[in-house]
Image (cartoon, helix red, strand yellow):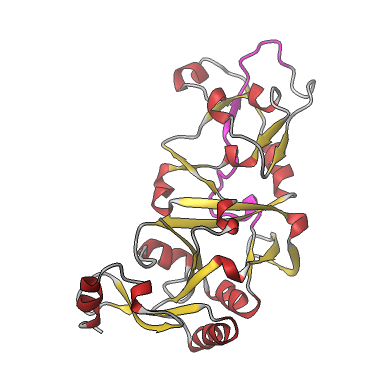
Amino acid sequence: MKTYKYLGTVSAECFLKDQTIRFSQPKAFNDPFELQPEFHVLDEGFIEGEARPCQFVIHGCQSSYENYLLANHTAQTQARKLDGKSIFSQLNEKIGILCLTQAETIIPANFLMWAHYAESHQGIVIEFKSDNEFIKNSSPVHYLPRRPIIDANFLYENEYVAIEDLYFKSDVWSYENEIRITKALSECKKLNVRDLLGSEVYVSEIPLDSIKCIYLGCNSSDSIKSAAIQLHKSSGINVIFLKVHDEEYKLIPYTNLGGTWSDIYKTSEQLMFDREKI
């Protein structure tokens, strides 16, 4: 399984220049349901605010949400819901998330991801080394057909709760096969700029030794190509240029700086087939 990060033009230029990537607050995501499962109160004697709620932690806490998931028929009999907006608001002030995708493909070939997150193939894709510590700190996203309903005791019976226990998304997003790396915003660099939603922008430097190679979109600009070449010259990172296949719905590499074609292709037959088309 390979791990990729798709970047649009502005993010790509920033990364190629100083190797930083944005860690976004949940409120800056394109999904308004982020970190907002339903919390239902089953205990009639439960008084919100009476008990001390849990502390959310980024690392070192075992997942426990499955023990508190409620079946739909059970939840429907309960009229009382716990307001989770305060939790969402607090996390927005404390954490930044880097969203990555995993795939079995030889090269990053998810056309929807290229279109949405790499701005119509104008950006780049970073491939990370699978055995690197940077990736080992990631957490999977759970895809479900409906929003999960969780017993509110989940927040009060556990002193610590893993933030990844809130990483739920609708299964319409499952094509992204997303994993996430979470950092405290206090560990990131705050830029003097805001995004289109008005959210502050935080970035963090990505260790070069965690990167296997960089793919340039088939519509990438000359400035991005130039910046990628400069990064290759200064760091030795493998840079691969992609173009549209002449006959099929797929992308193929046509230039490979710093690597060999065997780094990309698993078999000599695949190499021979596509090199004939170049």
**Screen quadrant of the C terminus:** bottom left
Left or right: residue 120 versus residue 272 is right
State the residue in front, 17 or 25: 17
Residue 154, located in which quarter of the rendered image? top right
Q: Quadrant of the N terminus?
A: bottom left
Q: Residue at x 75, y 65 (%)?
A: 189
Which residue appears at 51% of the width and 15% of the height?
77
Q: Is residue 181 above or below residue 160?
A: below
Residue 79 in picture, x, y percent from top left: 58, 18
Establish if 229 lies above or below 82: below
Residue 71: x and y in percent read 47, 21
At which x and y percent is residue 199? 69, 59
Q: Nearer the viewer, residue 139 or 233?
A: 233
The total number of labels drawn is 0
Residue at position x 50%, y 19% from top? 76
Q: Is residue 245 above or below residue 145?
A: below
Displayed quadrant of residue 62: top right
> Start and end of the magenta stretch?
24-46
Identify the main secondary structure in magenta: loop
User: Magenta stretch: residue 31 in it?
Assistant: yes
- The image position of residue 183, as x and y in percent, is 68, 53
Q: Nearer the viewer, residue 7 or 170?
A: 7
Task: Pick whichever, 193 or 129, lies toward us.
Answer: 129
In the picture, residue 160 is in which quadrant?
A: top right
Q: Is residue 86 left or right of residue 233?
A: right
Q: Residue at x 48, y 73 (%)?
A: 213
Whether residue 236 appears in magenta in the rendering, the answer is no
Q: Residue furthest top?
A: 45
